Image (cartoon, grey):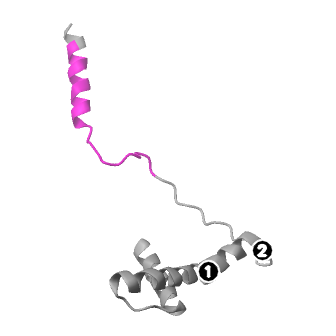
Amino acid sequence: MEKSTGSRQEGDQKQKKKKMTIYTVNKIQEPKKPEEEPPKDTKVTVTPEQVGEFIGTVFLTPLVLMFAWNFVAPTLFGLATINYIQSFAILIIARCFRQ
């Protein structure tokens, strides 16, 4: 019986010596391999969806914002009307806050 309790004591001592850590990975991570560069002679392809997204982002979204602002803000809050460039600037500022 002493041997069995002695092995339990040794096991308890091993558990006490084991340090707690906040890290979930206990193995050493291998250094990342550099990503392979694509060949330089590849052509960039632009899909029609990307063209439509660009047109919507650059041209239509500021236009919709300008019309909505000029319809609502002056009558409700007494603010000045804005032009296209100002609405585009508001969108840029809003995207900066979102990121």
> Left of 4 or right of it: where is 59?
right
SS category of the residue bearing label 2: loop
In the image, is residue 62 part of the stretch drawn in magenta?
A: no
Q: Nearer the viewer, mark 1 or mark 2?
A: 1
Query: As displayed, is residue 41 above or below residue 23?
Result: below
Provide the secondary structure element on which disc 1 rests: helix
- Is residue 15 one of those drawn in magenta? yes
Which image quadrant is residue 60 in? Answer: bottom right
The crowding category of the residue bearing disc 2, from other C-alpha atoms within 10 Å (few below 14, some 14 to 19, many at least 20), is few
Closest to the observer, 4 or 59: 59
Q: Which residue is mark 1?
A: 60
The residue depicted at 20 percent of the width and 14 percent of the height is 5
What's the residue type where badge 2 is placed? Thr
Estimate how packed mark 1 is, as few (under 14), some (14 to 19) or many (20 or more) residues with alpha carbons within 10 Å: some
Q: Nearer the viewer, residue 3 or 39?
A: 39
Separation of marks 1 and 2 at Cα, in angstroms: 23 Å
Residue at position x 21%, y 17% in the image: 6
Task: Say which label, 1 or 2, has the lower sequence index.
Answer: 2
Mark on residue 4?
none
Residue 47 horizontal/vertical position (percent): 76, 71
Quarter of the image with the N terminus in it? top left
Q: Decide: marks 1, 2 in contact (CB < 8 A)?
A: no
The residue positioned 45% from the left and 51% from the top of the image is 28
Label drawn at residue 45: 2
* Residue 67: percent from left, percent from top: 53, 83
- Nearer the observer, 5 or 93: 93
| Boundaries of the magenta span | 5-28
Q: The residue under label 1 is which amino acid type?
A: Leu
